[in-house]
Each structure stands twice: as structure tokens, then as C-alpha cells.
Image: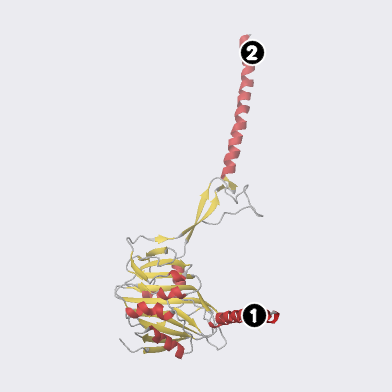
Amino acid sequence: MVGVRRGRVGARALAVVLALCAFQLGSLVAPAWACGCGAMVPGYRQHLAVGREESVVRWDGHREQIVMSLTVSGDAGRAAWIMPVPHRATVTLGDPALFGTLAAATAPVHRHRYHFWPHDGDWPLTSGDGFGGPPPGVGAAPSVNVVGRERLGPFDVARLTATDPAALGDWLTAHGFTLPASLPGALRPYVDQRWEYVAVRLVPKTADTALNGTLDPLHLAFAAEAPVYPMRLSRLARTPQSLGLYVLAAHRMEPGSAIGGDQPRVVYAGRLTAKSGALAQLLPGTPYLTAVDQEFPEPSRISGDHLLRRAPTDAAFQQVIYEDRLREVAGVPAWLLTVAGGLAVLVAVPVVRTAGRARRGPRAGRARE
């Protein structure tokens, strides 16, 4: 009996060890999903995460352009990226300087805001080790049809059509990439709407270099009856996603809904001018820029694509960051001068009264004589 029990215990222990090994192996084999507006598929046993996605959407009423820049991290030396588009797209390299120009144009305005009475951090209400400073400011066969293929810098771009989501899996598998089982289901709405796809292979300059940092932007252009920013595939991401969207149109624009993320925040709205550079090429006919930031703490809740619409007004908006400062006069806090002046008055009044009485006293005595 003892031997049988020992055998059962040993079998259970072996089962637990095998289960742990299987779990660890699965975590190594499964690709780390992170999506921008498309699906990012790293190579076998490699990990890739998209920490920040910035895109420019230009819509002139008939044609849409998307310039997209992804900031990635991980150990993947190669990856594939899939982006659905409503119509046949052309793909070129974008200008990295475009995002720097837009960031400068939409940067918050810093202004001073003065207060009379001292706040925490002002003398004498100092806190911490220092003596203040202002507080912080507030119907085809199930196979992929490659309609075009280009090599653009580090990108191998294929423009694809397919009526079966599994066809994209076949294409990726043929090119050495692992396709998660959840992707075909996520692609089904696009297949039903007869969208097409842009598939991109990201290849670093050398074989032993991982894909890290901000990638060169890609510039897509396609016909569009209404402006749309594809986001549905981002629901496959395993880490929180951050989106920065610059929308160029004839008027101020806004997302139709939050699509499962935090409420979109307009951080800039206004008309722009530019005489040269990548921004100047995009502005004719679409001079109004709306900049939107949005966070997706739980990407699995993303319910669809961003459908952009005209805002109720073209009211301009720019963020203002106030730096609180204590009002001073010649380097001295105004409140201190006020308090000191008040004390001086309080002291002076009795002195004046006493002096007046002293002057009146002798005169009154002589008058009585």
C-alpha cells in the first residue's frame, strides 16, 4: 500500500511539473500581441509591443490619407503588420518630420497665474526640503491575392485582397510568422464589408537588430466616403494602448464615440498654415487640424473603428498650462507688504492719539487759569 501511495504521489508531482513546463513553453511560443490600428504579429518565439501610436488622418471629402508612426519595443527581429482599408490603397514612406511639426503646432501654451495669499510651497508655507517655488501646474477562393508589392525602406509592403480571413493566416504562415487563432475572427467584419488589407513586413537593418523605438512612418491613401480610422484589430492587444490622432479636414472633427476606450480628449483645434515641408503638402483643402488623445486601458473592450464626423462648431481650442506664482512687489511678497503696512497703521494710530492728547493737555490747563 505504501508503495502504491508513493507511486500516486510521484505521478501527481510529475503531472504538476509537466503542466508548469507546458505553461512556460506556451508563454514562450505565443507571440506578444500589440496592435496599432492594425495587427502586429512578431516572429516565432519573439515579443513586440506597441507603446504609442501617432497618426495623421487627412480627409478632403473623397479621399483619405493616413500617415502612421508606431513606437515599438521588444526582442523581435522581424514582424508583420496588418491594416484593413475600405478601398484599394497606395503605400509610400512618410516624412518623420511631420509629427515633430504637428507636435510643435499643437503644444500647450504656458502662462503665469498670480495669487495674492501664499499657497503651499510659498514662504512661509514651505513643504519638503526647499523654500518653495510654485506648485505644479494644474467571392474569391480562400487564398490571398497580392495586388501590389513594394520595398519601402525597412518595410516589405504587400497590398492584399481576400474573402476568407484564414487566407491572411496562410499568407503569414508562408512567410514564417505565427498567426494567433483569434485574428481570423477579428477580421470577419472587414471581410463581410469587402475591405482590402495592407500587410507589412518590418525588417531591421541587420539580422541581429531588434525592432525598437519609433519606426519610419508609412503613408497610405485610399478612397473614402467618410473618414475612418481602423481600430478594431487593436482589441487583440495584451497591453494598454495609447493613441494620438491628428485629423486634417475642412472643419473641426471629432470621433463618433469612445469605442471602448477612455473618452477622447481634444488637445488642439484650429486652422494651420505652413509654407514648406510635409505639413504644407497636406494642408491645401484641409486647413483645420483637430488633435485627439485617447487611452485604451483594456484593449479587449474596443468595439469598432473610429468613425470621424464634423464637430458642432469650428471653435478653436488650445491647452493652457498655468504656472502659479506668488504676486510680488520689488521681490517682496505683496501679502507681506500688506500685512506689514496694516501692522504699521495699527501701531501708528495709538501713537498719534497719545501725541495729540499730550499737545492738548498744557493748553487746557492754561485755559482754566
Looking at the image, residue 45 sits to the left or right of residue 130; the answer is left
Q: Is residue 277 visible?
A: no
Q: Is residue 269 visible?
A: yes
Q: Position of residue 212 (x, y in %)?
A: 54, 79
Q: Is residue 115 above or below residue 361?
A: below
Q: Is residue 238 above or below residue 170?
A: above
Query: Given this view, does label 2 or label 1 mark the residue nearer the observer?
Result: 1
Q: Is residue 325 above or below residue 287?
A: above
**Amino acid type, callout 1:** Arg
Q: Position of residue 208 (x, y in %)?
A: 57, 87
Looking at the image, residue 225 sits to the left or right of residue 100; the answer is left
Looking at the image, residue 61 sits to the left or right of residue 289; the answer is left
Q: Secondary structure at mark 1?
A: helix
Q: Which mark is residue 365?
A: 2
Return the disc, 2 or 1, that comes first in the chain's sequence. 1
> Foreground residue, 332 or 361?
332
- Counting other residues with Cα less than 10 Å from the Cα at mark 2, is it few (<14), some (14-19), or many (20 or more)? few
- In which quarter of the view is residue 94 placed? bottom left
Q: What residue appears at the point 62 percent right and 9 percent down from the top-left corner?
A: 368
The C terminus lies in quadrant: top right
Q: Which mark is residue 250?
A: none
Which residue is disc 1 drawn over?
Answer: 8
- In which quarter of the view is residue 261 placed? bottom left
